[in-house]
Amino acid sequence: EISRKDEVTVGPGGVVSIAGGKLTGFRQMAADVVDVVAERFDRSLGDGPGSKPIPGGQEVSAGSGVPLRLRRLYGSEAPAVMALGDQPLVDGAPVVAGEVAWAVEVEAAQTLEDVVYRRTRLAWYVPQHRDALTQAIAPMMADRLGWSDARRDQELASVFARFDDELAFRGPGDPS
C-alpha cells in the first residue's frame, strides 16, 4: 500500500531532489523537477522535448544481426555502436570494441571504472572475462583520451582494487 508517487523536495541548501515514482513516469518527473528549479531561480524555461523518444528508445528487431546484449544496453543506437567496431575484445566475451569507442566519444566516459561498471556493465555481467576485458579496454581508452602510461596504469590499479574490494567478503579458500 506504499505510494509510488514521486515527490520533489528542496533541501535547506537549495538542492532539488526527487524521490519515488516509476520509471515509466520519467518524463513527467523530469518536468516537475525543471519546474521547481525554474521557480526557484525565477526563470521561464521553454517547452521540453515532448514525446520525443529518449536516445536509443526505438526498438531494434531480433533479426537485425545485433546481439541481444547490445540491443538491451543501447537500444536503437546498437547498430551505431557495432559500426564503431564489432570485433570482440576478448575471445568468448560479448563486449565489442565499438562499446569503448561509443563510451568515450558519444557518452563522454573519462575513467576506466566508468566503462567497466556503468557503460559495458562487464564487471557484474561478464565476471569470467572481467580481468581480461579490463586489460583490453585500458589501452583503447588511453589512446582515445591521450592518457600517459602512468595514467593508464593508475586507472587499471583503481579498477582492480575495486574488484578485490568487492570480493573481500570471501574467506580464505572460499572459491565462490
Image: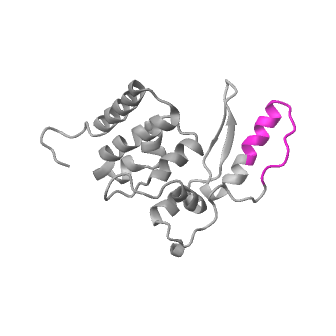
Residue 7 higher or lower than 62, as above or below: above
Q: Position of residue 162 (x, y in %)?
A: 34, 35
Left/right of residue 114 with respect to residue 18 in the rendered view? left
Magenta-span inclusion, residue 39: yes
Q: How is the image coloured?
A: one colour
Most distant residue in the left direction: 173
Which residue is at 62% across, 52% downward? 21
Percent position of residue 91, x then y? 31, 56
Towards the viewer: 28 or 136: 136
Residue found at the very far bottom of the displayed protein: 63
Most foreground residue, 122 or 146:
146
Is residue 175 located in the magenta-colored stretch of the structure? no
Please tell me in which quadrant of the rendered image residue 158 appears: top left
| Nearer the observer, 18 or 92 | 92
- Location of the N terminus by quadrant is bottom right
Residue at image coords 86%, 31%: 42
Q: Is residue 61 left or right of residue 18?
A: left
Residue 84 point in image, percent of width and height: 53, 53
The mark total stands at 0
Q: Residue at 53% x, 39% y: name it.
A: 109
Horizontal relation, residue 138 to residue 62: left or right: left
Residue sitting nearer the eye, 7 or 140: 140
| Quarter assignment of residue 60 | bottom right
**Position above or below: 12 against 31:** above
What stretch of residues is rendered in magenta?
31-49
Whether 7 is drawn above or below 3: the answer is: above
Compared with residue 131, is residue 152 higher up or lower down, i.e. above or below? above
User: Which image quadrant is residue 37 in?
Assistant: top right
Residue located 79% across and 49% down the image: 48
